[in-house]
Image (cartoon, coloured by chain):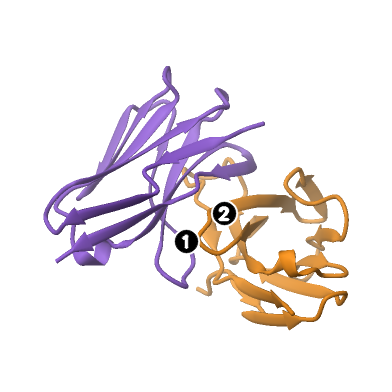
Chain colours: A orange, B purple
């Protein structure tokens, strides 16, 4: 049973380029969360999605950042015109459909480490 | 907005001693409180969680307590071992989905 998959694991972009981060949730999970982690800091919530719907994007910057979770395929976090301050580890997590069973655990992927040069 | 404060930021204990990490949350509607352990360069992993209808939960050497009135919750690790060394994050959220707010983390060092 594969866990949450993220790719790429490491991504280097020059300032002004676009970064696309992918997240495949665990099988049977329909909820995806994206977090940003700066070095030596905690996890900052960015966005919460269900299939084809953005439920809460209150943690995501209004400009340059977007996220989607299409009916088919992985969830994508897209950062346009990257700047040095975007350098961070981006983790996604998935959870089962809420209300089933007793588990509300979020299972984290290995993260994508974005470096903007 | 919602906020979770976590203390201490760094904790150093001798092997075999206990470690306590404390968190407070601001959103009184929060009803689910997970704790995650993150080793260097790895993903966060859930170690224990507690819901608001429970005051305490224990799993072997790990226990979590919750005081809803004071909006405090704490992680207790007994008989610490070097492999407990990691960063621990508390979090608060609403059951049913919605965003999870994480504390800033506590770096625990267990000295052999």
Q: Is residue A39 visible?
A: yes
Q: Position of residue A54 (x, y in %)?
A: 80, 49
Tell me the quadrant of the picture where the C terminus of chain B can be found.
bottom left
Number of marks = 2
Q: Residues within 10 Å of mark 2 (few under 14, many from 20)?
A: many
The residue shown at (53%, 53%) is: A42
Q: Residues within 10 Å of mark 1 (few under 14, many from 20)?
A: many
Q: Position of residue A113 (x, y in %)?
A: 62, 74
Chain that bears disc 1:
B
Q: Nearer the viewer, residue A43 or A22?
A: A43
Query: Is A5 positioned to the left or the right of B56 in the image?
Result: right
Q: Quadrant of residue B20?
A: top left
Residue tagged 2: A43
Q: CA distance from mark 1 to mark 2?
A: 9 Å
Q: Are marks 1 and 2 in contact (CB under 8 Å)?
A: yes
The residue shown at (52%, 37%) is: B4
Q: Is residue A21 above or below residue B53?
A: below
Most extreme residue toward the left is B16
Q: Position of residue A18 (x, y in %)?
A: 85, 75
Chain that bears disc 2:
A
Query: Is A38 positioned to the left or the right of A72 in the image?
Result: left
Residue tagged 1: B44
Picture disc at residue B55: none
Most extreme residue toward the top is B69
């Amino acid at each position: 049973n594969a866990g949450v998959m993220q790719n790429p694991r490491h991504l280097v972009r020059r300032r002004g380029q676009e970064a696309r981060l992918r997240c495949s949730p665990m099988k049977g999970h329909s909820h995806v969360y994206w977090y940003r982690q700066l070095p030596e800091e905690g996890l900052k919530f960015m966005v919460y999605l269900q299939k084809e719907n953005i439920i809460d994007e209150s943690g995501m910057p209004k400009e340059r950042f977007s996220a989607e979770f299409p009916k088919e395929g992985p969830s994508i976090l897209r950062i346009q015109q990257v700047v040095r301050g975007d350098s961070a580890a981006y983790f996604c997590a998935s959870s089962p459909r809420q209300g089933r069973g007793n588990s509300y655990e979020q299972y984290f992927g290995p993260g994508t480490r974005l470096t903007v040069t | 907005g919602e906020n979770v404060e976590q203390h201490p930021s760094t904790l150093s204990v001798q092997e075999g001693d206990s470690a306590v990490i404390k968190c407070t949350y601001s959103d009184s509607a929060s009803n689910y409180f997970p704790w995650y352990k993150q080793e260097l360069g790895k993903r966060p992993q859930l170690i224990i969680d507690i819901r608001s209808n429970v005051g305490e939960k224990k799993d072997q050497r790990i226990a979590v307590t919750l005081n809803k009135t004071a909006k405090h919750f704490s992680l207790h690790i007994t008989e610490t071992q070097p492999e407990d060394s990691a960063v621990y994050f508390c979090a608060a959220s609403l059951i049913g989905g919605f965003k999870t707010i994480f504390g800033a983390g506590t770096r625990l060092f267990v000295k052999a």
